[in-house]
Image: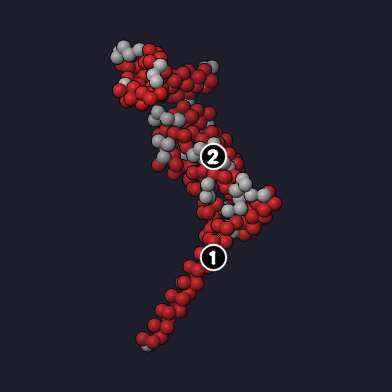
Amino acid sequence: MDNEAEESSVVARTAWWKIQVQRVNLVEEASSLIKKLSWHTREEEKEDAINKLQYIKDEALHLLVQPISKDYWDGAAETVIRLGYPRVKSILPGLLEWIQDLNWPGAGEIAGFLLEIGDPMIPYVKDVLNQHSDDQEWVYWIFEKLIDHWNTKQVQQIQAELIKISQEKANDLSALRILLTHGIYAKDVVCEIIQHKKDVLVFELKELHDTHLDCEALHKEFLNQQPNVIKQFHEHNKDRFYICNAISNRQEVLREIEIFTAEFLTS
């Protein structure tokens, strides 16, 4: 009986190792093809690699998400798009991360691809809005490239997340615009929220201006510094720069609120 158990164990371990070797081979094969997706690869060779990658195994799909370095990303994006959905379902979170910066190669194409996928993207978008709402640029692009193009039924599924963001200081106007245009918030509710935001900003600006700091003079003084002392000048005046930046940021938000009000709240 012991011999049978031992033999069974050996067979199981052998089978496990075979699976691991197969996985390694699959990854190595995919990796060698992905190395041909560079900007510097001849078009014929790149096209051949993309065609062969259409048969990539699920275990190796993750290798296509922003591989190696940026000069490979356009080719990887094209490969992903050709694979299509639901083939790439397992890497959707990674593809959503790809649009953290639309300046990244392939990001625009991936964004368009994710928009076409539609409803299956909702749980992943919801997750980002819940866990990464402080990532201002990423959330901005998710609004710009995905949520802004969703229908009301889709938007309603992220209603709680939109309400939460509308109460924050980053991307709040984007959230309010979506809530308003899809009838989740009435115009008078949005007007009240906007007025509260303005009141807070005006109060904060008054407190900042009470410091009587001449930000224009500070900026001119900074520009007149020699290159070798700019860092020391900034460090020595960091508190003053902080106040001036705070004033500038709040003034910019007030301008954005005025534009929002004129576009969406003025009859």
- Residue occupying the point 52% across, 22% down: 264
Residue 258: x percent and y percent? 47, 18
Residue 160: x percent and y percent? 43, 37
Count residues near mark 2 (Cα–Cα under 10 Å), then give few for <14, some for 14-19, many for 20+: some
Amino acid at dot 2: Trp
Which quadrant of the structure image shows residue 117?
Answer: top right
- The local secondary structure at tag 1 comes to helix
Residue 3: x percent and y percent? 39, 87
**Observer-nearest residue: 251 or 258?**
251
- Residue occupying the point 58% across, 58% down: 32
**Observer-nearest residue: 49 or 199?**
49
Q: Can residue 172 be seen in this view?
A: yes
- Closer to the chain start, of discs 2 and 1, is 1
Dot label at residue 182: none
Seen in the picture, residue 184 relative to 59 is either above or below; the reply is: above
- Residue occupying the point 49% across, 44% down: 97
**Observer-nearest residue: 97 or 184?**
97
Residue behind mark 1: 25
Q: In which quarter of the image is the N terminus?
A: bottom left
- Residue occupying the point 36% across, 26% down: 231
Residue behind mark 2: 104
Which quadrant of the structure image shows residue 164?
Answer: top left
Q: In which quarter of the image is the C terminus?
A: top right
- The local secondary structure at tag 2 comes to loop
> Residues under labels 2 and 1: Cα distance?
30 Å
Seen in the picture, residue 108 relative to 66 is either above or below; the reply is: above
Colour treatment of the image? secondary structure
Amino acid at dot 1: Asn
